[in-house]
């Protein structure tokens, strides 16, 4: 009995020091450089999202722009945001103007890799055009590192595993 109790204590101590992490808790961290085109006007609002195999929003990864009154300019993402009421304070940063760049870290569940998911970067600028798929990248082992050209306000997005 004493031996069983010692083994149980050892397992509990090991679990506490190593952390009880299941596979679903593991996060893939991607350093993400976002370079904007040289447009004129206000700073761009952007949402980086995890999109499932059916094209449905699953998770907000990063938001550029902290004033929620402009979030509705990101039309598709905003409808998801309104339904889900995600807390985005911890994953948001200031808008940046044309020609500027920003760096953020995207945290994505590793279990989503190579399963048909995509990263979508959606952009909008006040009183200007909205781009639902400014950049969209399949989330695979071979695409988590590279440069991806934008079709709107984003010149390119560079992803680097962190």
Image: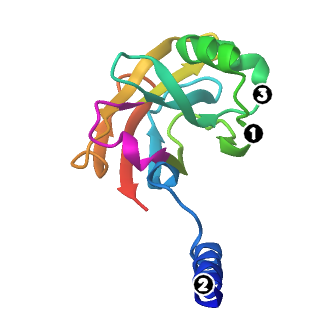
Quarter of the figure that contains the N terminus: bottom right
Q: Position of residue 87 (x, y in %)?
A: 73, 33
Could you tell me how far apart the alpha carbons at marks 3 and 1 are, in whole angstroms? 10 Å
Which residue, given by chain and number where applicable, does mark 3 sit on? Answer: 67
For the point 34% across and 31% down, the residue is: 117
Assess whether mark 2 and mark 1 are in contact (beta carbons under 8 angstroms). no
Instruction: Return the disc, 3 or 1, that comes first in the chain's sequence.
Output: 3
Instruction: Return the disc, 1 or 2, that comes first in the chain's sequence.
Output: 2
In the structure shown, which secondary structural element does the residue marked by tag 2 occupy?
A: helix
Nearer to the camera, 43 or 144: 144
Q: Position of residue 134 (x, y in %)?
A: 40, 24
* Disc 2 packing (10 Å; few <14; some 14–19; many ≥20): few
Instruction: Return the disc, 2 or 3, that comes first in the chain's sequence.
Output: 2
Front tag of 1 and 2: 2
Q: Which residues are magenta?
A: 108-119
- From the viewer's perspective, tell me whether residue 1 is left or right of residue 33: right
Which residue, given by chain and number where applicable, does mark 1 sit on? Answer: 89
Which disc, if any, is residue 10? 2
Could you tell me how far apart the alpha carbons at marks 1 and 2 are, in whole angstroms? 39 Å
């Amino acid at each position: 009995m004493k031996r069983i109790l010692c083994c149980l204590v050892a397992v509990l101590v090991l679990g506490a020091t190593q952390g009880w992490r299941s596979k679903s808790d593991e996060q893939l961290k991607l350093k993400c450089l976002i370079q904007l085109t040289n447009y004129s006007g206000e700073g761009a609002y952007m949402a980086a999202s995890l999109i499932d195999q059916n094209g449905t929003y699953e998770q907000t990864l990063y938001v550029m722009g902290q004033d929620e009154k402009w979030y509705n300019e990101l039309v598709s993402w905003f409808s998801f945001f309104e339904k889900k009421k995600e807390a985005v304070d911890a994953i948001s940063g200031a808008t940046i103007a044309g020609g500027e760049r920003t760096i953020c870290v995207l945290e994505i569940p590793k279990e989503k890799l190579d399963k048909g998911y995509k990263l979508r970067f959606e952009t909008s600028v006040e009183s200007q055009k909205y781009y639902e798929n400014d950049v969209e990248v399949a989330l695979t082992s071979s695409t988590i590192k590279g440069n991806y050209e934008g079709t709107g306000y984003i010149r390119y997005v560079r992803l680097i595993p962190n």
